[in-house]
Amino acid sequence: MNRIIKGFFILTVTLPLLSGCWDEIEPQRMYYVNGVGVDFKDNQYEVYLQLINFKDIAKSETPYAREAPAEIGYAKGETMEEAIYELYRSIDQEVFWGHMTYLIFTEEALKHEEVISVFDTFSRFRETRYQINVHFTQDSLEEILLITPILNKPLIDSKLSHPLNIRKLEVFTEPVSLRNLVIGLNEPSHEVSLPLVSIDENWETTKEHPSKETTIKGIGILSKDGFRGVIKGDTARGVNWMQNKKNRGDLTFKLDSNKSLTVDIEKKYFDVKPIIKGNQVQFKVDIKVDVILNGFKSKATENEIRKEVIKKVKEEIKATYEAGLKLDVDIYRLSEYLYRNNVKAWKALENNGKIPLTKESIKKINVQVDKIKSGRKTFETTIKE
């Protein structure tokens, strides 16, 4: 009898504790948002929701077949929120936003006067994080969201979700998080360069259709007053050298023998210094790099390579800067360097957060080649002629 009473007592004590978990939803009974695409057409928002498989998030040692790595939902609405709620009506389980990794906009969406409110929505929502990556594209959102990484890797490892994965290969332009976008639009020069995502069909597969991948083809500049324009291809390469972080890239140039040479560049040091004279300001840029030789031309000398690297880096910086001037954009955020260095001078010169810039505003670009590394071999050809 005592055992029955004790058992009943334990049951009455523990049941209230267990009931606290009864309203929790099991992870496998939820849908997980990985990415969101936003377009704007005919005065309506078009929202694409990329839902991924729970197995792509949960770590598992057991391989499985990814029959459907993602499902893409699509809906329209007068506001973005209305479009999202329209999608909710066609979903049969709860949606979790805490694993969302990126936002991607079309050019039309970025040109819409209320695009800032979209950023505000995602920064305010309790489940989303400030480290969401922000991209834009001129291609089909649906196609981009359906692309699976090479070798069928999980979508959470794609360059849209984790663009820093490709830092060891080459950083064409610095990834932009939702946090950095808000900071960039709030501080001088109130402009942010977003990566331009395009579809690449350079890969082949054993399947019937060619494999597609995403690639970064340039940058689009967004200001707090609207979308300013796009800088594509080689014209945008100067951004790579003007980032205040250590990174790497490649350079291809002609030697005196008229042969082409491609080298790896590792940037070790970067600094921009404002030079103020009266009511005018110019900027001095200092860059220090290491050069790594992969292929090698027998008649190339160390001095020749050094000279061509310096010349090419300067050309790319100037080309991107002048392309920005044509769009009335402070592409290298020179206004911010003055703001940080001498706020009194910035206040005297600024107009709407930006200082006036001309081709002569960058007074000097000093590129220093610290080392030229020959890889595993000496500074000679591997096979003697």
Image: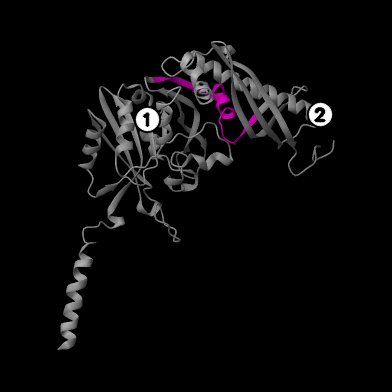
Residue 237 lies within the magenta run: yes
Residue 195, given in percent of the width and then of the height, sits at 47, 30
**Furthest residue to the right?**
385
For mark 2, what is the residue? 299
Q: Nearer the viewer, residue 186 or 174?
A: 186
Q: Which residues are magenta?
A: 227-251
Q: Is residue 148 visible?
A: yes
Callout in the foreground (1, 2): 1
Residue 64, given in percent of the width and then of the height, sits at 42, 57
Q: Is residue 299 above or below residue 353?
A: below
Q: Is residue 116 above or below residue 85?
A: above
Query: What number is the disc on residue 301?
Result: none
Residue 338, given in percent of the width and then of the height, sits at 52, 22
Q: Is residue 126 left or right of residue 201?
A: left
Q: Is residue 160 left or right of residue 278?
A: left
Q: Residues within 10 Å of mark 2 (few under 14, many from 20)?
A: few
Mark 1: amino acid: Phe
Query: What number is the disc on residue 105?
Result: 1
Q: Is residue 258 above or below residue 72?
A: above
Mark 2: amino acid: Lys
Q: Nearer the viewer, residue 114 or 343?
A: 343
